[in-house]
C-alpha cells in the first residue's frame, strides 16, 4: 500500500470509529425521546433521515449495477472489483435500512410492512423489493466470494478461521466449481439488475406519485432517482477502488479507476441533462406550485447547498478533474469521492423543498410568517443519528475488506477462471 | 358484507363493549343503521359535512366544535404548532381556498376563520399510500385510522393534500387536559386524524363537532349525501358550495358555503 493509500485508509477508520461513537449519542436520543429531538414537524414531516436513506440506497443500487458489469456483462477490465462493488452495495444497503428503520415512529412494528402490506402503496411494494434485494445481495456476495474463501481457508489467524467458517464446508476449488460459480453469479446478477432498478425506481415513485406535492409529482422523478443512484454509486466505487482496490502493485488499479472515471463522466453528463430538463421545464412553465420549490432550491435560504455543494463540489470540480486529470487514479478517486459525498445535498434538495411548499398556505403563515423559506434545519440529534448510520455502513465495509479476501492485491491467476469460459466475455 | 356476518360482528362488538365498558372496541364494526338521514334505501352511505362559513363567522372566535372534538377524543394540548395534534381547527378562508379567493376578493371573506378537518375524501390519497393498511376507507366513506397498525412512516401526512393529519412527536398522554376513559389514547410515534366520530355514529349520535355547533349557531350540517332527501343532500343540491382543491380529484366530503 502506498503512503497516500495508507493515510486514506487510516483516515477512514478514524472517521468511521469516531462517527460511530459520536453517533451513539444520536442513537440514544432517538431510542429515548423518539422524534421529539428532530426539527421536522407536521409541516415538513420528512427530514434528514429520509434523505439519508435515499442517499445510501442510491449508493447501493449504483454499486450493485457496477458489479453487474462484471458478473452479468463480464466486462473483463472491471472483473477484479466485482466483489468490492458487491461489498459496497451490501454495506450501504445496511446503512440505508438502518436509517429508515430509525425514522419510523414505531420501529417495533416494521414487520407490518411485510406481513400486512398494502400492495396499493408504492411503499408497501418497496418493503418486499428490499427484502428480495437484501437476500439476493447476501447470496451473490457469498457466491462471488466462495472461491476466495476456499483458497484462504487454510490461512492462519482470524481471517483464515473466518474464511473456513464462511465456506460452510464447501471446499471445492475445481475448474468445474468455478464455472458453476460464474454461471450462478450471472443468474443472480441478472435477477439483481431489474430488482435494483425496480426498488430504486420505486423509491423515486414514492415521491413521484404524491399528487399533493407538485415538485415531486412527475414521471421524471423515478428516472432522476435512478440515474442519480447509478452516478453516486459508481462515484463511490471509484473512490473505494482508488483507495482499497486491487492492482496497485501491477498497475491494474489505474486502468480500473480510469475506466470507472469514464463511466462516471458519462453518467454525470446524463444527470446534468435530466436536472436541466427538470429545472428548466419547472421554471419556464411557471406554475407557481412547482416553480416555488425550484426557486427555493436555487435562490432560497439554502441556495448555497445547490450552487456551492452540489454544482460546485459535486458537478464542476469533479467534471474538471475527470476531464483534465482523468488518467490519474488519484484524481478520479477524488472526483468520485466528491460526487458521492455531495450527492447527499441532492437528496436533501429532493425531500425538503418538495415539502416546504405547504399543502395549505395557512400553515406557512402559521409557522413562519409570509414568504417562502425552508425553515427546517436538522437538529444535532438528527445529524448524530445520520452519522451513526453512515459510520456503521463505513465500518462494516472496512471490516469486510480487512477480514475477508475481497480484494486480491496481486493478480491472482487462481481466481481468473472464475469469469472465463462463460459466453459473452467482454474484453 | 352479508347480513349474518355483520350481525355476528355487531354482537361480538357489543359483547366486547359490555365487557370492557369502552366504546372504542366497536370502532369500524358496528353499522349505524339508525343515524340521521340514513334513508334506509340500501344505497351505500356517504357521510358528509357542510359548513356555512358566514354563520360560523358570525360567532366571532367561537371554538365550540374544536373544544368538543378535543374533549371527545383525548386530544393532547401541545402549544408548539409544529407538533400539535389537530383533528379540527380554524384557518383563514384565503388559506383554505387559495385559488378561489384572490387578493381582490372581499376582505371579510378572505379573512374569515373557518373550520377545517379531514375531508374523508372519496378518493383518499392517504389510504393509497399507507404501506400497512393502517388507514382505510369504510363502506360508508369514513376514512378510518387504526393506530395499532400505524408504523409512523408519515407517508400519509406527505400524501394528504389538506394537512389533515398529525404525527405524535411526543407521548400525547402527558398533555391531555381531562382524560376520558372511554376513548383510547394514542402513543408516541403514530399518526392520527378526524374519524368523523365513527364511535358516535355507531350509537346513532352526530359527530361531536356538529352537535356542539348545533348548540351555538348551527353552521354545520351532517348527514348522508347519498340520500337526496337528507338535510345535507338538499343543501348541497340547492346551494353553491365549495370543496378544497377539487382539481386533485380527491372528492372531499366537507362542503363549504362561503
Ligand atoms: S383529507 Fe387528507 S387525511 Fe382526510 S381522507 Fe383526504 S387525504 Fe386522507
Ligand atoms: S404513518 Fe401510519 S397511517 Fe400514515 S402511512 Fe404510515 S403507517 Fe400508514
Image (cartoon, coloured by chain):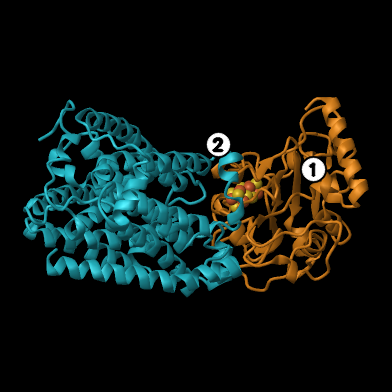
Chain colours: A cyan, B orange
Q: Nearer the viewer, residue A328 or A277?
A: A328
Q: Which residue is farthest right? A: B18
Tell me which residue sits at (85%, 39%) in the image.
B32
The image position of residue A373, as x and y in percent, is: 44, 69
Q: Which of A41 and A34 is in front in this view?
A: A34
Dividing the image into 4 quarters, which one contains the C terminus of chain A? top left
Q: Nearer the viewer, residue B52 or A413?
A: A413
Residue under numbered circle 1: B232
Q: Is residue A406 visible?
A: yes
Q: Which of marks 2 and 1 is in front?
A: 2
The image position of residue A200, as x and y in percent, is: 38, 44
Q: Is residue A301 visible?
A: no
Classify mark 1 as within 8 Å of ligand 1 or not, answering yes or no: no
Residue under numbered circle 2: A120
Tell me which residue sits at (29%, 57%) in the image.
A157
Residue B103's place in the image compared with A202, above or below, is below
Q: Nearer the viewer, residue A408 or A370?
A: A408
Circle 2 packing at 10 Å, graded few (<14), some (14-19), many (20+), is: some
The image position of residue A388, as x and y in percent, is: 43, 66
In screen coordinates, is B162 left or right of B140? Answer: left
Chain bearing tag 2 is A
Dividing the image into 4 quarters, which one contains the N terminus of chain A? bottom left
Amino acid at each position: 500500500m502506498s503512503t497516500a493509500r495508507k493515510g486514506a485508509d487510516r483516515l477512514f477508520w478514524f472517521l468511521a470509529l469516531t462517527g460511530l461513537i459520536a453517533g451513539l449519542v444520536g442513537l440514544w436520543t432517538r431510542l429515548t425521546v423518539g422524534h421529539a429531538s428532530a426539527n421536522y414537524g407536521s409541516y415538513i414531516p420528512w427530514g434528514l433521515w429520509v434523505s439519508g436513506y435515499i442517499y445510501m440506497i442510491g449508493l447501493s443500487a449504483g454499486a450493485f449495477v457496477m458489479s453487474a458489469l462484471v458478473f452479468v456483462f463480464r466486462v473483463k477490465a472491471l472483473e477484479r472489483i466485482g466483489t468490492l462493488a458487491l461489498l459496497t452495495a451490501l454495506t450501504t444497503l445496511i446503512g440505508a435500512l438502518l436509517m429508515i428503520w430509525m425514522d419510523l415512529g414505531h420501529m417495533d412494528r416494521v414487520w407490518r410492512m411485510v406481513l400486512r402490506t398494502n400492495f396499493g402503496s408504492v411503499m408497501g411494494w418497496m418493503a418486499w423489493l428490499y427484502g428480495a434485494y437484501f437476500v439476493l445481495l447476501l447470496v451473490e456476495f457469498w457466491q462471488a466470494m466462495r472461491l476466495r474463501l476456499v483458497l484462504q481457508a487454510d490461512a492462519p489467524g482470524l481471517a483464515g478461521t473466518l474464511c473456513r467458517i464462511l465456506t460452510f464446508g464447501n471446499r471445492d476449488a475445481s475448474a468445474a466449481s468455478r464455472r458453476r460459480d460464474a454461471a450462478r453469479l450471472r443468474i443472480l446478477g441478472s435477477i439483481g439488475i431489474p430488482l435494483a432498478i425496480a426498488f430504486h425506481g420505486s423509491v423515486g415513485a414514492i415521491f413521484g406519485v404524491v399528487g399533493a406535492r407538485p415538485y415531486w409529482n412527475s414521471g421524471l422523478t423515478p428516472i432522476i432517482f435512478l440515474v442519480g443512484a447509478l452516478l453516486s454509486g459508481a462515484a463511490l466505487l471509484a473512490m473505494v477502488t482508488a483507495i482499497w482496490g486491487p492492482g496497485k502493485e501491477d498497475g491494474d488499479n489505474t486502468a480500473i479507476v480510469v475506466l470507472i472515471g469514464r463511466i462516471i463522466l458519462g453518467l454525470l453528463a446524463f444527470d446534468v441533462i435530466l436536472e436541466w430538463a427538470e429545472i428548466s421545464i419547472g421554471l419556464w412553465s411557471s406554475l407557481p406550485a412547482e416553480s416555488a420549490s425550484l426557486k427555493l432550491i436555487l435562490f432560497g435560504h439554502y441556495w448555497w447547498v445547490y450552487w456551492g455543494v452540489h454544482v460546485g463540489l459535486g458537478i464542476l470540480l469533479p467534471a474538471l478533474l475527470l476531464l483534465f486529470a482523468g488518467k490519474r487514479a488519484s484524481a478520479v478517486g477524488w472526483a468520485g469521492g466528491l460526487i458521492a459525498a455531495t450527492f447527499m445535498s441532492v437528496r436533501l434538495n429532493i425531500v425538503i423543498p418538495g415539502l416546504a411548499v405547504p399543502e395549505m398556505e395557512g400553515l406557512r403563515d402559521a409557522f413562519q410568517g409570509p414568504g417562502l423559506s425552508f425553515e427546517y434545519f436538522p437538529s444535532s440529534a438528527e445529524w448524530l443519528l445520520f452519522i451513526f448510520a453512515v459510520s456503521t455502513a463505513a465500518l462494516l465495509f472496512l471490516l469486510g475488506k480487512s477480514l475477508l479476501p475481497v480484494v486480491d492485491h496481486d493478480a491472482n491467476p487462481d481466481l481468473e477462471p472464475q469469469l472465463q469460459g462463460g459466453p459473452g466475455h467482454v474484453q | 358484507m352479508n347480513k349474518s356476518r355483520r350481525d355476528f360482528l355487531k354482537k361480538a362488538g357489543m359483547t366486547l363493549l359490555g365487557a370492557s365498558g369502552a366504546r372504542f372496541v366497536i370502532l369500524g364494526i358496528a353499522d349505524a343503521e339508525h343515524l340521521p338521514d340514513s334513508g334506509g334505501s340500501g344505497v351505500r352511505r356517504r357521510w358528509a359535512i357542510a359548513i356555512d362559513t358566514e354563520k360560523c363567522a358570525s360567532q366571532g372566535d367561537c371554538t365550540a366544535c374544536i373544544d368538543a372534538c378535543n374533549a371527545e377524543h383525548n386530544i393532547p394540548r401541545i402549544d408548539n404548532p409544529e407538533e400539535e395534534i389537530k383533528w379540527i381547527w380554524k384557518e383563514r378562508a384565503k388559506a383554505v381556498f387559495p385559488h378561489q379567493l384572490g387578493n381582490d376578493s372581499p376582505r371579510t371573506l378572505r379573512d374569515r376563520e373557518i373550520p377545517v378537518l379531514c375531508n374523508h375524501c372519496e378518493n383518499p390519497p392517504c389510504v393509497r399510500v399507507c404501506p400497512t393498511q393502517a388507514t382505510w376507507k369504510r363502506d360508508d366513506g369514513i376514512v378510518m385510522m387504526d393506530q395499532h397498525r400505524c408504523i409512523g412512516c408519515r407517508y400519509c401526512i406527505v400524501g394528504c393534500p389538506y394537512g389533515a393529519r398529525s404525527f405524535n412527536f411526543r407521548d400525547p398522554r402527558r398533555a391531555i387536559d381531562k382524560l376520558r376513559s372511554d376513548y383510547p389514547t394514542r402513543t408516541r410515534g403514530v399518526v392520527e386524524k378526524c374519524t368523523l366520530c365513527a364511535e358516535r355514529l355507531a350509537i346513532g349520535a352526530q359527530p361531536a363537532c356538529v352537535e356542539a355547533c348545533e348548540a351555538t349557531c348551527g353552521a354545520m350540517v351532517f348527514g348522508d349525501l347519498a340520500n337526496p332527501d337528507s338535510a345535507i343532500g338538499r343543501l348541497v343540491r340547492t346551494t353553491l358550495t365549495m370543496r378544497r382543491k377539487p382539481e386533485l380529484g380527491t372528492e372531499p366530503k366537507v362542503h363549504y358555503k362561503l
